[in-house]
Amino acid sequence: MKISEFIKHAGTTRDTVRHYEMLGLIKPEWVQGRRDYTDKQLSDMDAIMEMKSMGLELKEIQMIVSLKSERGCGSGALIEGVINKLTDQFTALLREEERLRQSRQAIEAVLHELRSLHAQNAKEQPTP
């Protein structure tokens, strides 16, 4: 399929596809001097989008794609690499979640104080 059809199926943009090609994440077939995208590239794009949705960066995705092409889809090295990257991402998300929880609590405390102060000021204001 041509790139226009591919981007419709993949739900992405031409620039994104070209960028991923440049990074070696998507490798279309070449037919008569033109790129031809197949279900394999759609599957690769789905996997890339899923990894991105988990918070993996393109460099990390490149490493995983490289391991897959070097060692094969079910290889121990690939599985171990994916486990390591996802474990790192999971740990980072836990830290971020804790940071956000602390920020939320601090904001809630300040809001509570400000609302109390506002209510006191409203009571102290004489009504005309």
Image (cartoon, rainbow, N blue to C red):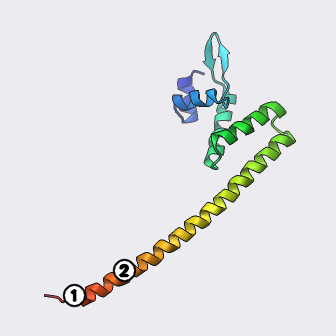
Q: Taking 74 as reference, is 21 left or right?
A: left
Farthest left residue?
A: 128
The quadrant of the picture occupied by the C terminus is bottom left
**Residue 80, image x, y percentages:** 82, 46
- Nearest the viewer among 94 and 79 is 94
Which residue type carries mark 2?
Answer: Arg
Secondary structure under the numbered disc 2 in the rendered image:
helix
Farthest right residue?
A: 76
Which residue type carries mark 1?
Answer: Gln
Which of disc 2 and disc 1 is earlier in sequence?
A: 2
**Residue 5, image x, y percentages:** 55, 26
According to the image, label 1 marks what residue?
A: 125
**Residue drawn at the location 64% of the way across and 32% of the way down:** 42
Query: Relative to 114, does residue 88 appear above or below in the rendering?
Result: above
In which quarter of the view is residue 69 placed?
Answer: top right
Mark 2 Cα-neighbour bin, 10 Å: few <14, some 14–19, many ≥20: few
Q: Taking 122 as reference, is 18 left or right?
A: right
**Residue drawn at the location 47% of the way across and 75% of the way down:** 108
Query: Relative to 18, does residue 106 appear above or below in the rendering?
Result: below
Mark 1 Cα-neighbour bin, 10 Å: few <14, some 14–19, many ≥20: few
**Residue 36, image x, y percentages:** 63, 19
According to the image, label 2 marks what residue?
A: 115
Cα–Cα gap, marks 1 and 2 = 15 Å
**Residue drawn at the location 18% of the way across and 89% of the way down:** 126
The quadrant of the picture occupied by the N terminus is top right
